Image (cartoon, grey):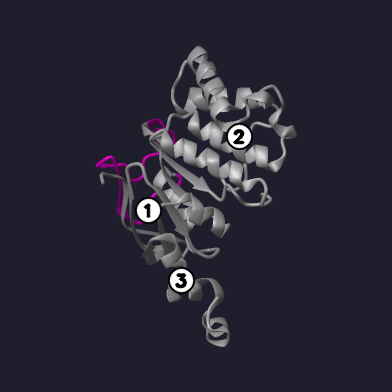
């Protein structure tokens, strides 16, 4: 299967603290790839390197076989890489519809009339069309998560980086989110998903990469990776594992 996005030997430090040690990954076209690891493992930093928020100290990022290392976020977005954020960042004083129109105009470079058409299309896909005239600041958390996905999808991405989109949601709210993600993937969008809600992650992805201290410790089928001793140790610690015999 064709590789659409690749990171090669990435490293990033902040004032002597190594956030990404030696990270390499490949996202295949049409794939949903899970990126998992404990807090501080480097997952969000990896997203920031891909989208150009940070430039890696060393290493290369390739998108569709082109070197995009260090390109600024607006260019990576225009090329077709969109993302969501752990903390939703809508324009609270704009309506749901206006938020998505802005994303389509500035993320995909569409003219206003095209952006409005795209926004309506995306809101219907995401399930927010009935909320289009509500101010974003009045939305509940699950709706804000959906709006994050709508704004990303309005950028017409080929790759979506989804950062903890299930965080804070109830068990009853997650199936709807999973359906949205699968719909986006069925539209030809390749996805990297970061999440601590493991059932959601396992149900959503084809393959998982586990990282700890900024480097890959396991890779493969989701349930196999979750059973990997290195992965269990990274989450729970060696002493807990020895005392309990595992999860």
**Quarter where residue 57 is shown:** bottom left
The outermost residue toward the top is 113
Disc number placed over residue 147 in the picture, else none: 2
Asked whether, in this view, residue 224 is left or right of residue 8, the answer is right
Q: Which residue is mark 3?
A: 227
Q: Secondary structure at mark 3?
A: helix
Q: Is residue 222 magenta?
A: no
Image x and y of residue 189, in percent: 40, 37
Asked whether, in this view, residue 130 is left or right of residue 246, the answer is right
* Residue count near mark 1 (Cα–Cα under 10 Å), binned few <14, some 14–19, many ≥20: many
Q: Nearer the viewer, mark 3 or mark 1?
A: 3
Disc 3 or 1, which lies upstream in sequence? 1
Q: CA distance from mark 3 to mark 1?
A: 31 Å
Q: Quadrant of the C terminus?
A: bottom right
Residue 32: tell me if it is visible: yes
The outermost residue toward the right is 138
In the picture shown, does residue 143 fall above or below 24? above
In the picture shown, does residue 131 fall above or below 206? above
Q: Nearer the viewer, mark 3 or mark 2?
A: 3
Disc 3 or 2, which lies upstream in sequence? 2
Disc number placed over residue 149 in the picture, else none: none
Magenta residues (range): 53-78
Disc number placed over residue 56 in the picture, else none: 1
The outermost residue toward the bottom is 243
Q: CA distance from mark 1 to mark 2?
A: 30 Å
Disc 1 or 2, which lies upstream in sequence? 1
Residue at the image point whose x is 58% and y is 57% from the top: 197
* Residue count near mark 2 (Cα–Cα under 10 Å), binned few <14, some 14–19, many ≥20: many
Residue at the image point whose x is 53% and y is 82% from the top: 241
Image x and y of residue 114, in percent: 48, 15
Question: Closest to the observer: 27 or 95?
Answer: 27
Q: Are marks 1 and 2 in contact (CB under 8 Å)?
A: no
């Amino acid at each position: 299967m064709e590789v659409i996005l690749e990171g090669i030997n990435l490293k990033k430090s902040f004032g002597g603290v190594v956030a990404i040690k030696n990270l390499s990954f490949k996202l295949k076209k049409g794939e949903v790839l899970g990126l998992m690891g404990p807090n501080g493992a480097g997952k969000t930093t990896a997203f920031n390197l891909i989208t150009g928020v940070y430039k890696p100290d060393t290493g290369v990022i390739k998108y569709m076989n082109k070197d995009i290392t260090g390109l600024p976020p607006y260019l990576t977005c225009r090329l077709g890489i969109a993302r969501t954020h752990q903390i939703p960042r809508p324009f609270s004083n704009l309506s749901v519809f206006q938020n998505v129109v802005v994303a389509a105009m500035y993320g995909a470079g569409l003219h206003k009339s095209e952006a409005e058409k795209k926004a309506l299309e995306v809101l219907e896909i995401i399930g927010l069309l009935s909320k289009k005239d509500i101010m974003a600041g009045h939305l509940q958390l699950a709706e804000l998560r959906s709006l994050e996905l709508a704004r990303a999808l309005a950028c017409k991405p080929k790759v979506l980086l989804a950062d903890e989109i299930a965080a804070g949601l109830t068990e009853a709210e997650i199936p709807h989110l999973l359906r949205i993600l699968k719909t986006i993937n069925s539209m030809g969008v390749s996805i990297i998903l970061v999440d601590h809600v493991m059932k959601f992650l396992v149900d959503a992805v084809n393959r998982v990469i586990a990282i700890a201290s900024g480097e890959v410790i396991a890779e493969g089928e989701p349930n196999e990776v979750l059973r990997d001793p290195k992965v269990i140790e990274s989450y729970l610690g060696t002493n807990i594992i020895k005392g309990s015999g595992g999860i």
